[in-house]
Image (spheres, helix red, strand yellow):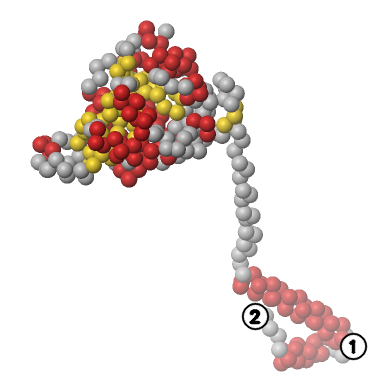
Amino acid sequence: MFGIGFEELLVLAVIAFILFGPERLPEYAAKLGRIVAKVREASSELSRQYQNPFTYPPEPAADAALPAGPEVACQYCGHKTGQEFAFCPKCGQRQQLDQYPPPLQPAEPTVEAQSPEASGESQTASPQIRPLRQDEIDQALSIINQAAQAYNGVIPADCWQEPYMPEEELRAEITAGVNFWVYESEGRPVGVMGRQDVLDVTLIRHAYVDPEFQRQGVGSRLLAHLLKEMPGPVLVGTWAAAWWAIRFYEEHGFKLVCQKDKDRLLTTYWNISPRQTETSVVLADPKWLAIPIYHE
């Protein structure tokens, strides 16, 4: 493009010789050389722009790693925890920045288990809810201690033991009036939940589901079955750091009580250590919340 060969230069020289004569020929030859050089320079620049019309920006720098989240202090007792805690593990109060960790499992639907007669299947194959039998103590302990592993490293270290519930403790709870119910599936218990009538309320105690059967609605069905038989107010106690258990009961209509009521209720209706009282919370059902005398 815009190239000038030897023949073109020779023709131009002859024309210049005729027009200007031999005296001025060197002057005009120099001018012609400069013009040709500029034309070639312009041609090269235009060719480069045509071949690469786009100028790409440099690659953006990779984002720097985000710093770890700072600790926050409980506004009630001053205990420092991570931002992922919705409740203080020490005093049990809901934090000002209430944000649960990402849900680990979907909410279990409240669906009542069908009886074998209604489903038309054999008693062995059909799920059913029934009282715990004495010969199933070992199975109940296995369910409780497997499911309770979720507390290991979450609740205060001085509140953890192996096994989480020894056999003598379970038998002592039964002797104290805790009636255990089981959810039977595939011919064996896969979930347990206790209820205990104490004075003028009913407590939900020791609710656990075999890890193999979790996220299948077992806990919701057990809770729905027991609540049908409880005409009076119902209370639930759990660890303040066990956010998944708190969320489960809140999804079924329970609400956390205030710090003042929590301490009074735990010492009135539960027989637990001061350390467990300090690190636990209490949730109440709508019947309890509707009675002013309980929480004046």
**Mark 1 crowdedness (10 Å alpha carbons): few <14, some 14-19, many ≥20:** few
Asked if residue 77 lies left or right of residue 288, the reply is right
Q: Amino acid at mark 2?
A: Met
Q: Nearer the viewer, residue 215 or 50?
A: 215
Any mark on residue 220, and which? none
Residue at 71% over, 92% down: 7
Element type at marker 2?
loop
Residue 140 occupies quadrant: top left
Residue 155 in the image: above or below residue 22:
above
Query: Which residue is label 2 attached to?
Result: 1
Q: Are marks 2 and 1 in contact (CB under 8 Å)?
A: no
- The percent position of residue 83, horizontal first and vertical second, equals 55, 33
Image quadrant for the N terminus?
Answer: bottom right
Residue 221 in view of the camera: no
Cα–Cα gap, marks 2 and 1? 33 Å
Q: Nearer the viewer, residue 171 or 69?
A: 171
- The percent position of residue 23, horizontal first and vertical second, equals 90, 88
Which residue is most to the right? 23
Query: Which residue is label 1 attached to?
Result: 23
**Mark 2 crowdedness (10 Å alpha carbons): few <14, some 14-19, many ≥20:** few
Residue 137 occupies quadrant: top left
Element type at marker 1?
loop
Residue at 78% over, 89% down: 13
Q: Nearer the viewer, residue 199 or 135?
A: 135
Asked if residue 283 lies left or right of residue 36, the reply is left
Which residue is most to the front? 168
Residue 263 in the image: above or below residue 98:
above
Mark 2 or 1, which is nearer the eye?
2
